[in-house]
Every structure is written in structure tokens, then in C-alpha cells.
Image (tube, rainbow, N blue to C red):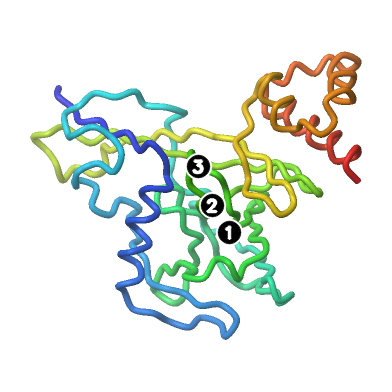
């Protein structure tokens, strides 16, 4: 059965297209402290359009990550939003749309997305905490949502990326058969600087956390931390923060 596989090189390209579309929609006010805009509830806007950063339909590309949903919080848990001005909103049902890179909530019968994410300090629900952060992507500086993995002066962040497989070409409207694959990418955010990618390996860690190389080398030797897993990264960043206090 012939399938079409689309590779989203990064969720950031998709976010740009989705954001433009959302800004053309109706703007509402769910709270005087939060500006919102209507968003698509399907999570698959223009799913059959030409790919943004992948091959043309019919091109077979690798699917990265683990098959799963494109939402964090698909069951709409209640969450807490802390605004940059210190205000708190704790009455919203929230979810994160990975494909659109949008933080969404329910208002009446509408699914809305925050149109001014820079006004949000943290968004917490279902055991996850998200921030809206500036980051370095190749030679450009962008902004997007990250999950906060390790807090502190230097923060370990995680960005989810999506690839997806379209249904059989003879059944282009069979959206139920679309398969999404979610990959996780880690970043380090230092004060006053865009977040930078941090790989799960020793070389990358020493390159990015380069202000305390000697101490980190000794820490890795004593603890046996191989920097091969996200948990290894989390422990390393936590230790790094004790050196940078």
C-alpha cells in the first residue's frame, strides 16, 4: 500500500504557518490578562498541503521518535498559568499542541490558543510545566514552547518535534489512519542568552556547559554519569547550577 510520508524538519516551521492562520481568525477575550485567538481543534490543519521542510508527497523519509499523540494533556487537565506580571490563572482546561506549537485552552465550546505567549511565565498541568523561550535554531533566533525539565539559573528544557505519515493515497480523507511520531530534543537556557541544543553525550555537555569544565570532568568521573540519557542530563545540569550560583 503506497503511503506518503512527510518529515517536519522542525515544529518551528509548522508553527509559523499555523500562527499566521490563527491570526486571521476571530480574536476573543477569555480573561483581561490574557489575549487569545481561535484555533483549529483537529490538530491537522492543511494536512494534505505540500510539506513545510520535507519532500514532496510520495517521498519516503524517516519517521523519528515514538508513535503517539500530538497533544500533551489530550484529556484537558486543569492547570495553572503564571503571567509575567505576577497574575495567576488557575481555572483553565489546558493542553499543548505539539504540531502547532500552541498552548490551548477551552472557553465555552471553543478551543483557544494564547496569541501573546510572551505574557506567560509558566504554564503547568498534568505534571508538566512549560515556558515560552527564545532559542537558537541553526543561524536564526526563534521562540517557542518548551517543557521545563530542570529549573535553576541554567534551565534544562525539552522541545518536542513531530513527523507524520499520511494515509493511503487512494483515501486522502482518512485522517484516522494518520500516524504521528514524537521526538524529544533537549536545550540549555542560560541567563540573557537564547537556549541552545544540548545532546545526550559527554562531548556536547562539555561544549555547552563550558564555564566549569574541570569541575564537570571530575563530577562525571566520580559519579560515573555517562551523559547518555535525559536523566543523566538532568543530574548534570542540577550539578552545574550549584557551580554557577
**At 43% from the left edge and 69% from the top edge, which residue is drawn?**
112
**What SS does tag 3 mark?**
strand
Q: Position of residue 37 (x, y in %)?
A: 41, 73
Question: In the current view of this chain or complex, which residue is farthest to the front?
Answer: 139
Q: Position of residue 117 (x, y in %)?
A: 54, 66
Going from the N terminus, do you reach mark 1 or mark 3 first? 1
Quarter of image, res 226: top right
Q: CA distance from mark 2 to mark 3?
A: 26 Å
Residue 77: image tag = 1
Question: Is residue 158 shown left or right of residue 114?
Answer: right
Residue designated by label 2: 73
Q: Quadrant of the N terminus?
A: top left
Number of residues whose C-alpha sits closer than 10 Å to that of mark 2, classed few (under 14), some (14–19) or many (20 or more): many
Residue designated by label 3: 137
**What SS does tag 1 mark?**
loop
Quarter of image, res 25: bottom left
Q: Position of residue 129 (x, y in %)?
A: 66, 53
Q: Is residue 39 positioned above or below 193 on the image?
A: below
Q: Are marks 2 and 1 in contact (CB under 8 Å)?
A: yes
**At 85% from the left edge and 31% from the top edge, which residue is drawn?**
212
Amino acid at each position: 500500500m503506497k503511503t506518503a510520508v512527510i518529515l517536519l524538519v522542525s515544529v518551528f516551521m509548522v508553527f509559523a504557518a499555523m500562527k499566521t492562520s490563527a491570526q486571521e481568525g476571530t480574536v476573543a477575550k477569555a480573561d483581561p490578562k490574557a489575549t487569545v485567538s481561535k484555533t483549529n481543534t483537529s490538530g491537522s490543519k492543511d494536512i494534505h498541503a505540500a510539506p513545510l521542510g520535507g519532500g514532496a508527497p510520495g517521498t519516503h523519509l524517516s519517521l523519528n521518535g515514538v508513535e503517539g499523540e500530538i497533544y500533551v494533556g489530550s484529556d484537558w487537565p486543569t492547570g495553572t498559568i503564571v503571567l509575567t506580571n505576577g497574575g495567576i490563572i488557575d481555572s483553565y482546561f489546558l493542553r499543548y499542541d505539539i504540531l502547532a506549537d500552541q498552548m490551548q485552552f477551552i472557553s465555552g465550546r471553543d478551543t483557544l490558543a494564547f496569541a501573546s505567549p510572551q505574557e506567560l511565565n509558566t504554564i503547568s498541568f498534568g505534571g508538566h510545566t512549560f515556558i515560552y523561550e527564545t532559542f537558537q535554531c541553526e543561524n536564526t533566533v526563534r521562540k517557542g514552547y518548551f517543557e521545563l525539565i530542570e529549573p535553576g539559573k541554567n534551565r534544562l528544557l525539552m522541545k518536542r518535534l513531530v513527523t507524520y505519515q499520511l494515509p493511503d493515497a487512494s483515501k486522502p480523507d482518512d485522517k484516522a489512519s494518520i500516524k504521528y511520531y514524537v521526538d524529544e530534543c533537549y536545550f540549555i537556557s542560560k541567563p540573557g542568552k537564547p537556549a541552545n541544543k544540548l545532546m545526550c553525550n559527554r562531548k556536547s555537555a562539555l561544549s555547552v556547559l563550558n564555564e566549569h569544565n574541570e569541575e564537570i570532568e571530575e563530577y562525571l568521573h566520580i559519579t560515573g554519569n555517562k551523559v547518555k540519557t535525559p536523566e543523566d542530563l538532568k543530574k548534570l545540569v542540577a550539578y552545574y547550577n550549584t557551580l554557577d550560583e
